[in-house]
C-alpha cells in the first residue's frame, strides 16, 4: 500500500522569523499523521529548516537543483550540496521552472538524474497549460514529460522517485481540477508506467498539485490513483497545511 505524501512548496516566500513560527506549529501537530510530510523552503533557509526539523519526522526538500555536478555555473546549486544540507527530496521540472525559466524536458530529466545520483529523491513535476488542456492534449503533454525521464534512465528510475501532476492552469489561480479530472490524469500516468513495469507503477506515488486546500483535499486524496499533494500557497499557513495533512492521513 502506498503511503500518502504531502509536500509543501514554499516558493519564494519566507523569513527566518516566519519560518520558525511555521515549522514549530507543524512539528507540534504532525506527529499523529499517517502520511509522509515534507517541506521545501527556498535555498537560503534550508540550513535553518534542517536544524529546526531535526527529530521531527518532517522531511526536507529543495525546490530546484542543477543538472551539473560541479564547475563554473554561477548561481547554481548541486545535488551534492543539497545532500550536505540534509535534503532528502528535491523538486524537478516545476511548471514555473519550465514556463518562466525555459527548462526543457531534457534539462528536467538531467536534473532528475543528478538528484538520484546523489541520493536525493526527485519529485518530478508534470502538467499542461490551459491551451493544451483546451486542445485535448493533456495526456500527450504529461506522457512526453514523463517519457523524457524514462527514456534517459529507464522505468526503474521511478522506483525511488515521486511524480506530481500539476495542471498549470490550476496553480495559484484558485481553480482546482475536479477530482475526476485529476484522477483521469493520475490513472494515465500510472498506466504509462505499468505498460513498462507493473510493479514500478503499483509502488509509484503520484501527487496532485493545483490550488489544494483543506476543503477539497479529502475528496482529491480519496481518488484511487492520487497519493497526496504538492501544496503551494496553503503550505505557508500552518492550519491550512495541517488540514491537508489530516485529509491525507
Image (cartoon, rainbow, N blue to C red):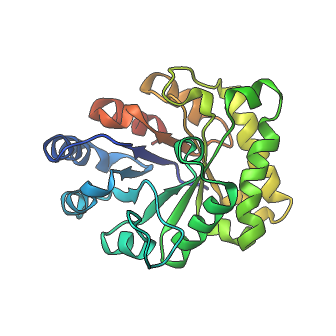
Q: In this picture, is 101 found above or below 79?
A: above
Quadrant location of the N terminus? bottom right
Quadrant location of the C terminus? top left
Name the residue at 51% across, 24% down: 216
**Which quadrant of the structure image shows residue 58?**
bottom left
Residue 119 horizontal/vertical position (percent): 48, 76
Residue 200 horizontal/vertical position (percent): 72, 64
Name the residue at 86% across, 59% down: 195
**Which quadrant of the structure image shows residue 9?**
top left
Q: Is residue 21 left or right of residue 169?
A: left
Residue 185 horizontal/vertical position (percent): 74, 38
Name the residue at 77% across, 43% down: 141
The residue closer to the viewer here, 35 or 188, is 188
**Which quadrant of the structure image shows residue 147?**
bottom right
Q: In this picture, is 52 found above or below 247?
A: below
Q: Is residue 137 left or right of residue 119?
A: right
Residue 19 horizontal/vertical position (percent): 21, 45
Amino acid at each position: 500500500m502506498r503511503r500518502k505524501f504531502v509536500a509543501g512548496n514554499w516558493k519564494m516566500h519566507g523569513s527566518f522569523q516566519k519560518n520558525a513560527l511555521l515549522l514549530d506549529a507543524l512539528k507540534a501537530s504532525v506527529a499523529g499523521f499517517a502520511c509522509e510530510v515534507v517541506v521545501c523552503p527556498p535555498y537560503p533557509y534550508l540550513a535553518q529548516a534542517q536544524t529546526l526539523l531535526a527529530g521531527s519526522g518532517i522531511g526536507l526538500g529543495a525546490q530546484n537543483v542543477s543538472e551539473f555536478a560541479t564547475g563554473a555555473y554561477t548561481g547554481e546549486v548541486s545535488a551534492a550540496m543539497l545532500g550536505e544540507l540534509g535534503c532528502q527530496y528535491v523538486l524537478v521540472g516545476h511548471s514555473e521552472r519550465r514556463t518562466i525559466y525555459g527548462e526543457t524536458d531534457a534539462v528536467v530529466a538531467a536534473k532528475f538524474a543528478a538528484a538520484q545520483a546523489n541520493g536525493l529523491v526527485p519529485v518530478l513535476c508534470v502538467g499542461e497549460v490551459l491551451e493544451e488542456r483546451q486542445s485535448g492534449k493533456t495526456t500527450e503533454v504529461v506522457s512526453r514529460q514523463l517519457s523524457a525521464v524514462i527514456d534517459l534512465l529507464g522505468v526503474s528510475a521511478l522506483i525511488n522517485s515521486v511524480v506530481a501532476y500539476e495542471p498549470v492552469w490550476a496553480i495559484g489561480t484558485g481553480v482546482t481540477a475536479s477530482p475526476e479530472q485529476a484522477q483521469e490524469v493520475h490513472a494515465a500516468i500510472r498506466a504509462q508506467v505499468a505498460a513498462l513495469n507493473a510493479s514500478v507503477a503499483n509502488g509509484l506515488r503520484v501527487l496532485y498539485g493545483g490550488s489544494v486546500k483543506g476543503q477539497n483535499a479529502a475528496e482529491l486524496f480519496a481518488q484511487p490513483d492520487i497519493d497526496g499533494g504538492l501544496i503551494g500557497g496553503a503550505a505557508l499557513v500552518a492550519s491550512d497545511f495541517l488540514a491537508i495533512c489530516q485529509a491525507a492521513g
